[in-house]
Image (tube, rainbow, N blue to C red):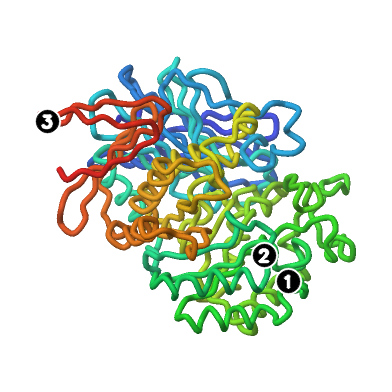
Amino acid sequence: MQENQIKAYIQYNDQKLDVKTKGMTVVDELYVDTYFDTLENGFSFKLYIHAKQKITLKKVVAIVDCQNKNIHKIFSNGFQSWSESREYSPSEEIPNLISFTKPFMQNYGDYFFNLKRGKGKIHSWTYTYLKENQKNNIQLFASLNERTGYTIFTYDHSSQKLIIEKDCEGLELSHSFPALEFIHLNGKNNDVFEQWFNTFEIQKPKVKPAIGWTSWYHYYTKINEEIILKNLNAFSEKNIKIDFFQIDDGYQNRVGDWLDIHTEKFPKGMKYIADKIHGKNIKAGLWLAPFVVEKKSKIFQQHQEWLLKDEKGKLISAGYNPMWSGHFYILDIYNSQVKEYLSGVFFTIFNKWNFDMVKLDFLYAAAILPRKNKTRGQVMFDAMEFLRKTCTNKIILGCGVPLGAAFGQVDYCRIGADIHLSWEHQLLKLLNNRERVSTIAALRSVLGRWQLNNRAFLNDPDVFILRNNKNKLSPIQQNTILTINTLLGKLIFTSDDISEYSDEQLDEFRSIYKWINSEIENVIQDNNYYEIYFINNNIQYCAYSNLNSKSFQKKIKNTTLQLEPFETMILRI
């Protein structure tokens, strides 16, 4: 790709300034440095703004002329952990939320951003890639700086152009600002992602692949000491080895009041539970959503000054959850008393209760509102740095977080939506909610974001379910979830009561030990049919996965493979 295939401009105050692709552009209020560096397999582009006086940014944009009519697929990385992320055909459309749902759901996703939507306009956050017909190579376009703001990539099929911009509207500048930095790399999937992360200088995770249990997808908030200990003891009784045992939502009286334990449910307290978990030689994990509070919480009622408000003094809702007394609200991470409170919460969890890991959820909430001197992305980065520093060397599982801000800051990270107790949540799908609870959407994101594993963090694909009760997933669907999660994830959790497992179900669980250390070489997609190429114990395999409701036939060498609806099959190749 040549230098003349890129154009760039900035908008500030009431001005639009076209800038050079390489070199310096000077006007009275500011000057802009741009750098275009040719690489062996691509290029890097950087745009720095130096304000001589106070200005207000509106847009920073680079436009790449792709000059290729053979683009077959475009990858869309969703805004945060739960946002559906997959390859799209050039003529597809990423839907917008149905309008009447926006007061309840819009803050979960990217609906705040004025994106160009419609057929043939595929947008992506932090990175994207383009894939040509009949080729294994991809063209990766990826941000080199999410600290200064979210980077959005939009492929416009009609013009064959890729628009790269920074979410920075309303940012007041009177200093130098690294406004846009990205890289383009052409090559094999694994190779270009490895090159990107090496250039990005993200430290690789130090934790190892792990297996565990979490209370949520079986008991939800209806947990207590008896239920927790019953499930804990089942692992030793069945001789199943796990690494983590995590207590989810329901141990606290209200969301936000993390140290106010529900004493009727947990009369002996949380340290007692952690000690019991450690007694089984298992690490203890605890869920919390550190940046949000519900209406009925003590913090909401007693500390309104801690809550995030807009310019008119109105409280900002982070979303709506009927299990949490409706709308829930956001703590201001720049309030010193909020930081002191959260620091005390983490100190208690780690040093008094002796938990080893925290699952930190709904993290996107911290950065819903930009500030005059900070973009949303800067706020999100500050929030993640605060969590990493406060949790010291303890293990963090991130969830509900814009992934770029989590790179190198968390140990494990959710890369898909919550699975559902059936294949799809039809109502939320009809409402175009990309962050919906959905098994099929979760699996597509796990299959789409596999390259982040062991580079940005270790991937958490959410839970698998093998139990017979309290779900509507068929045995074939359950096996597909387990297989995909185990191959493409490195934190493999369930919420099942394994004391109820049959011998066959126990054997399925034990299959995780064989496949969890597999090395993924490539994932190929075609309309909900996937081929996962991987190496396990120096042997090459392919997992053929049909996520459709109709059977699928695939010719392999001298035979025809038939996959039933929702079936996944592993074959040696």
Relative to 389, say whether 216 is above or below. Answer: above
Q: Residues within 10 Å of mark 2 (few under 14, many from 20)?
A: some
Give the Cα separation between the discs numbered 2 and 3: 52 Å
Q: Residues within 10 Å of mark 3 (few under 14, many from 20)?
A: few
Q: In the image, 350: left or right of 44?
A: right
Residue visible at 63% across and 58% down in the picture: 219
User: Measured from the top left, where is residue 164 in percent x and y?
Assistant: 49, 34
Residue visible at 67% across and 65% down in the picture: 223
Label 2 or label 1, whichever comes before in sequence order = 2
Give the Cα separation between the discs numbered 2 and 1: 7 Å
The quarter of the picture where the C terminus appears is top left
Give the Cα separation between the discs numbered 3 and 1: 58 Å
What is the three-letter code of the residue carrying label 3?
Lys
Q: For residue 297, what is the image quadrant?
A: bottom right
Q: Which mark is residue 265?
A: 1
Residue at the outermost top position: 158
Q: In the image, 561: left or right of 488?
A: left
Label 3 or label 1, whichever comes before in sequence order = 1
Of 159 and 448, nearer the camera is 448
Query: Label 2 belongs to which residue?
Result: 223
The residue mark sitting in front, 2 or 3, is 2
Query: Label 3 belongs to which residue?
Result: 557
Q: Which mark is residue 135?
A: none
